[in-house]
Image (spheres, rainbow, N blue to C red):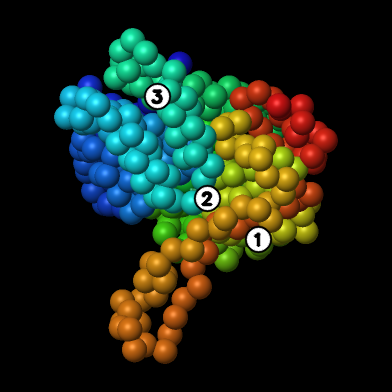
Amino acid sequence: MTKLTVQALQWTGNALKVLDQRQLPETVAYDMYDDAAGVTEAIATMRVRGAPAIGIAAAYGVVLSAYRHYHASPDDWRDKVVVDMAMLAQSRPTAVNLFTALATMGQALNASTGNPLADLLACAERIHADDVSANHRMGELGADVIGQVKGILTHCNTGALATGGYGTALGVIRSVAGRQTVAVYAGETRPWLQGARLTVWELAQEGIPVTLIADSAAAWLMKSGAVDWVVVGADRIAANGDTANKIGTYALAVLARQHGVKFMVVAPTTTIDWGIQSGAEIEIEQRDARELLPACYHAPESLISAWNPVFDVTPAALVTAIVTERGVVLEPSETTMGNLR
Ligand code: MRU
C-alpha cells in the first residue's frame, strides 16, 4: 500500500490527534482531543472536514467518550456515551458518513459484553482502515474508467485530508497520475478555499503537479478543451444517484454537460444514504455569513448580509459515473444504483 505522507487523523492510544486544516497551508499544527466535546468542536469548526474524515473522527470521539465515562460512571456510562453521540451528531448536518459511523459505533456499544473499551476502539479503527482500503480500490476503479486522459478538474479537497487516507476523487487522480502524465486542475472552492489551501498543498506533498484556477474560470477552462473529466467527491448520495457535494459542484456538472466533459463522483458506500430517494431530501448546511463577508461588514447594524450554503446537489442525470469500492455505476439512476446494495 502507498505510503501516506498526509494524515488528517491519528489515534495516539488515548487521544485523537487532528491536523488543524484551518491553518493550512501556512502552518502545519496538530491538536489533541481526549473527549467527545472536543471532537465535536473540531468537526463543527472544520479543523477536521471532508465527509469520511468527519465520520472517522466521530467514531474516535465515541471511543474517547467511553474511555472517560466507563470508570467515572460505572453504572450509567453507556447512557453518557449515548448523550455524547447525540452531541457528535449535531456537529454538521450534510455528510452522511457522520451518521453512518455513529450508527456503527452504536451497534458496537450495544453488542459489546466482554471488554467494551477494546471493542469500541476496534470498531473505530476498523471504520478508519476500511475507509483507507476503499479509497485505494476506488482509485484503481476510477483510473480504469478514465483511461487515457489529458486533463482533470477537481473541486474542494477530497484527499487524505478529507478521508482516512489516500482520498476519494483525489485518490483517483493520484492513481491516474501514477499511470500517466495528466494535467490536474483544482478550483479554489470559495468561500473556504479547500482547493486553494488544501488540495494544491496536498498534491504538492505527494509530488503531483497541479494548476489552481479561480472557480469562475472553470467554464473557460472546459471551453479550451484542456480537461476531459471533472472528478469530485460526495457528502451524501441519494438512492437515485443525486449527489450532495461542496457548493459549486452542481455548477461544474452543468458546465461539463455543456462542454462534453465527463463527470465522475467518487465516494465510498458509507456516503450513500439508501434511506432517501432523491437529493431533495438532503439537508444543506448553511454556515455563518461571516465566513463569506469581509470583516468590515460583520457589524450587526450592517445592511450587507450573505447567503452561505456550503453544499449543493448535482442531479444524477448530469453524472457520468459514480465510483465506489463496491463497483462503478455508469449513468446513475435508482435502478443502476441498486447494483451497489
Ligand atoms: O465542508 P467540507 O470541507 O467538509 O466539504 C467537503 C466536501 O464537500 C468534499 O468534497 C466531500 O466531503 C468529499 S471528501 C472525500
Q: Quadrant of residue 337?
A: top right
Quarter of the view holding residue 149: top right
Residue 197 percent across, percent down from the top left = 38, 52
Q: Is residue 190 above or below residue 200?
A: below
**Quarter of the image with the N terminus in it:** top left
Q: Is mark 2 within 8 Å of ligand 1?
A: yes
Q: Callout 3, which amino acid?
A: Leu
Q: Which part of the image, by quadrant, shows the C terminus? A: top right
Kindly indicate whether the residue at mark 2 contacts the one at mark 1 (C-beta within 8 angstroms): no
Q: Residue at x 44, y 63 (%)?
A: 287
Q: Which mark is residue 109?
A: 3
337 to the left or right of 214: right
Q: Earlier in the sequence, mark 3 or mark 2?
A: 2
The residue that label 1 is drawn on is: 251
- Disc 3 to disc 2: CB gap under 8 Å: no
Point out residue 232 in the picture as x, y percentages from the top left corner: 59, 44
Of the residues tagged 1 and 2, which is closer to the observer?
A: 2
Tell me where residue 184 appears, x and y as whole percent: 55, 44
Q: Dot 2: few (<14), some (14–19), or many (≥20) neighbours within 10 Å?
A: many
Return the residue at label 2: 94
Marks 3,1: beta carbons within 8 A: no
